[in-house]
Amino acid sequence: MSSIFIVLFGLVGFTFGWFVYSKFIAEKIYQLDPNYQTPAHRLEDGVDYVPTNKFVLWGSHFTAVAGAAPIVGPAIAVYWGWAPALLWVTFGSIFFAGVHDFGALWASNRHDAKSIGALSETIIGTRVRSVLMIIIFLLLVLVNAMFATIIADEMLEYPESVFPAWAAIPVAIAVGVLIRRKFNLLAISIVGVTILYYTIYVGSNMPLAIPDPLFGLGGHGDWIILLYIYAGIASMLPVWLLLQPRDYINGAQLVVGLLVLYTAVLLTMPDVAAPAFNDVAEGTPPIWPILFVTIACGALSGFHGIVSSGTSAKQLNNEKDARFVGYLGALGEGSLALITITAVTGSLYAASVSGGWHAIYPTITEGPAASGFIAGGALLISEGWGIPLSFAQTMLAVMVVLFAGTTMDAGLRLTRYIIQEWGNIYQIAPLKNNYLSTMVAVGACLLLAFGVSNGNYPGDGGTLIWPVFGATNQILASMTLIVIAVYLMKLGRPARYLLAPLCFILVMATGAGIWYVVDYVNKEQWILVLIQAAVIVSSLFIVLEAWSTVSRLRREEGADQAA
């Protein structure tokens, strides 16, 4: 069967999602009001609250939510077969992620751009806020630790990606200044993307390595420390100076990369080498429920709700832009997951290794993740476009690094927001300080990265974190859907379009979390046991609190009707 089927199935579904389903949700459920004054205008401070052009904000939002996860997750999950991965990515993006991301952005916009954790206090109660903010904090630390490891791995495996990845920073600052001075956005975008692709050409001919020794922790450990130094500094700068333009211009570059990949599929017409449903090896985790936490970003992700409510809501220029930024951002990430499935299951990739696809994916743990996307995608681009394979590999390696890097930028800033919100809630003055809260955020991430080890190198804790991240991420997604659903009920609007995905993902994520707790106990990985168990118990508490709130609303409604 041709890979074109996978591409068409997903893209047709996404087209329906954007033109039909998201329009229905925007008009009938969230009921967007173009005359509502957004927090970006009402609370504008030039640092975090900044009214932003919807195209710039979409690029910033898309690259912040679309880290390496929509590449790594699908590249792992195809081990069960391409069909389950394709179905979850397609329908998850349309009916789960789009509604979730869009809803978190809209609800936050209606509450002074509060994070979903702080927002839960207003909608459900103080106790829920306290518990949910702990889950959010844990997830952000997991994301930061995991993505730092992914970036370090790719920079060591593909040293050609080092120069273009770091060159993107001064380009982004220049773009931010020019946008601030009202230069033509299209011209800035064309010039910026051209420069970024030129740096890829330079990088493909000029591989760079980190000076050894730098911090005395080896290549991986040194890169991780350096990445946190950068991310800590970046998280304190005004959002318009680095975070927003870096995400935007990288987003434009990555959209070009996705177009090149999709066009390459049309030009090469590769067959699907992987089975639709694979005969997996003994000891493989069960597809139900593990598939639904292995592919999180790219189908549904609680991290997206944090970004939507944490940074994007503070930059929303007009409430009607929420559909474009939130729902279309989710579809953009779904398109990345879709092309990943195509790249790692295609015949070109399988033919590159003796023994074919099954030799590449002997087990779920031995199969490649980001490197599989780079190898398979580069073959597609080289074959379809006639581009040198080395340039194509560098281009995709940079794509992975930039996706992970922009998510790490946003993730550390969001971690700082959570710590500062705690400072405001509990009146702990030092935690309100930008510098101290950033140091606490960086310290927590480093503690996890270096405190949990896979025994490979200092700082390799991120290599163990993927399952914890997946289950925790989806549990948080279900919690975010609960908050939005209760808010809709309070407004007297139908919540069933959120309740169905909420119930499904809550069952899948809780089941996966329990499975992993047992697995970690058997492996004596006690820190991971503690994190996962705490998240499960906390989520059950939030469900009970939400149920209590809904029951109270129904009683009040019944009393009003009786009166």
Image: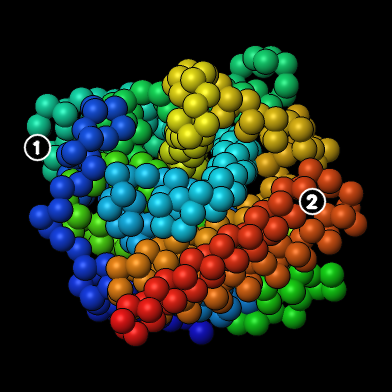
The amino acid marked with disc number 2 is: Val
Can residue 43 be seen here? yes
Query: To which residue does mark 2 refer?
Result: 529
Whether 266 is drawn above or below 66: the answer is below
How many numbered discs, if any? 2
Could you tell me if the residues under marks 1 and 2 are in contact, i.e. CB atoms within 8 Å? no
Question: Tag on residue 184?
Answer: 1
Whether 243 is drawn above or below 15: the answer is above
Question: Residue 477 appears at what percent x and percent y?
Answer: 51, 61
Residue at the (71%, 62%) spot, across then down:
513
Question: Tag on residue 353?
Answer: none
Foreground residue, 21 or 400?
21
User: Relative to residue 328, is residue 511 drawn left or right?
Assistant: right
Q: CA distance from mark 1 to mark 2?
A: 52 Å
Foreground residue, 190 or 551?
551
Please tell me which of labels 1 and 2 falls first in the chain. Answer: 1
Residue at the (10%, 32%) spot, across then down:
183
